[in-house]
Image: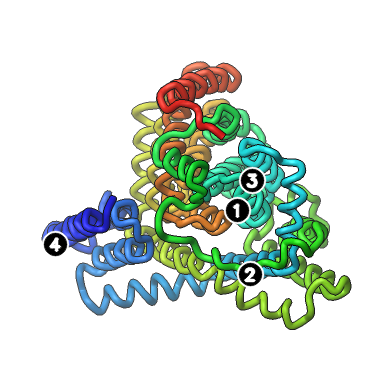
Amino acid sequence: MDKKSNRIFTISALGVVVVFLILAKFLTTPETVQQSFWALTPPLIAIGLALITKEVYSSLFMGVLTGALLYSGYNFEGTINHIFKDGIISVLSDSYNVGILCFLVILGAMVQLMNRSGGSAAFGRWASSHIKTRAGAQLATIAFGCLIFIDDYFNCLTVGSVMRPVTDKHKVSRAKLAYLIDATAAPICIIAPISSWAAAVSGFVEGENGMKLFLQTIPFNFYAVLTIAMMIFLVVFKVDYGPMRTHEINAIEHDDLFTTPGRAFGDDEEEADDTKGHILNMLVPIVSLIVCCVIGMIYSGGFFEGENFIDAFAGSDASVGLVLGSFGALVITIVFYLITNVLPFNDCMDCLPDGFKQMISPILILTFAWSLKAMTDSLGAKEFVAGVVQSSVVNFIGFLPVIIFVIAIGLSFATGTSWGTFGILIPIVVACFEGTDHTMMIIAMSACMAGAVCGDHCSPISDTTIMSSAGAQCVHINHVSTQLPYALTAAVISAITYLVAGITKSAAVSLIAGVIMMVVVLYFFQKTTGKEKE
């Protein structure tokens, strides 16, 4: 799309938003928007503008502004207070959010240290001698992503920093790398018993053994399983479609990893001479990061105060654990570099502000995304969706899994949070089926979790999606637009699979049906688009 056409689309989209806000002024009051469909309009506006204008910051702010106007009844003072006092300032005062931002900054500093020490270049040389093809580079990314199952934030940034030099060498587009990172973050964490996600889900279940229920939901988490199978099929059989195909063709034929003129944050990072550095300069930081983050997670859960490992993980605070772990890894890395004379102390310290600058863009997007969630919460979006789900349970009991799945997608897509969706829907599902139909309760819980992950994948305001873009150093809107067709493909097949599960109540039968549908659909795309040539 040329600049003139893009300008026309942008102006038209903003005009539609203005008209909507004018109509809402006369159709609503602060009381009528509460716990109604109006509560979901701010994120829908933000997401629509982001996809049309290709500009994330202003789109998110327009969503925040819409929510504040609806909440205050178009009162100027009330709107400004709600945007800043109840929105931006409030989310930046939340200890959990601040912990995630600190984790991002520390990870950025570690990436800078690994680059400047020559560790990234050394790993690239080692990988070049072992990974010979584009498919091999992508499969290695998937495998590494599956191994980092502790936390999705940790996964996104770690896998991106390690595999980016390898995929760049084999001309894998940044959009494809971002998709592989995103698709091995939440889908892996949601089926891994030892992860921050398992801990979160367990915490939302009252009156039941949360971890036991989580383990029982794994075979029914069709979106996660089918997404992983889909990634492998796409790579092995060289299938790409939608906007992703354009990005991959440009990377292969024109050596253009970005396709669009824009370049992602941090793309100008400093690297050491390729002839210097040792692979240990990469391995020591990564291994220490993994070990320290595990220790930090179980420490925050009370492991060293007598709790067993599983309970400590279930009761962990991901924000605190990741900050403590990443800080410990940062100290270990700096000490290792100083002892081995890899970097002088001044160069190590210079990497700290450089790492912060690298993460400014994702920090800004996360701040606006959290503020937008605060707007929807203040408008009663959770209560509105809860009412819809409860009425569905009564009237459509046979189709409950697919209904839960679709509702979870919509809620997670609109709010940009999987965990918030868990917190709303899982207690409702457990309350409806507790002591009556245990199998249907497990299937419905799985549908809720799968739908939340799916909506999270599709949403441009999702924190995991934002950090996948950061890890791949991909323009965020490019990641969203190229991943969307893949996520929707897996979503449609998963919805049909949950329909089968609601009838058969069998994980094996349903999953086999889902895999067969996935193979047929991707085979169709392969025949339609043709195989990509190396």
The location of residue 70, given as percent across then percent down, is 24, 63
In the figure, residue 11 lies in which quadrant? Answer: bottom left
Residue for badge 2: 270
Q: Give yes or no for contact between labels 3 and 4 (Cβ–Cβ under 8 Å).
A: no
Position of the C terminus, as image quadrant, is: top right
10 Å crowding of disc 1: few (<14), some (14-19), many (20+): many
Q: Amino acid at mark 4?
A: Ile
Q: Earlier in the sequence, mark 3 or mark 2?
A: 3
Q: Nearer the viewer, residue 183 or 90?
A: 183
Q: Give yes or no for contact between labels 2 and 4 (Cβ–Cβ under 8 Å).
A: no
Q: Amino acid at mark 2?
A: Glu
Q: Amino acid at mark 3?
A: Ala
Q: Amino acid at mark 1?
A: Cys
Residue for badge 3: 198
Residue pictured at 71% horizontal, 67% vertical: 272
Residue for badge 1: 156
Mark 2 or mark 1: which is in front? 2
10 Å crowding of disc 3: few (<14), some (14-19), many (20+): many
User: Is 272 above or below relative to 518?
Assistant: below
Residue for badge 4: 22
Q: Nearer the viewer, residue 238 or 210?
A: 238
Q: Secondary structure at mark 1?
A: helix
Q: Nearer the viewer, residue 387 or 95?
A: 95
Q: Give yes or no for contact between labels 2 and 1 (Cβ–Cβ under 8 Å).
A: no
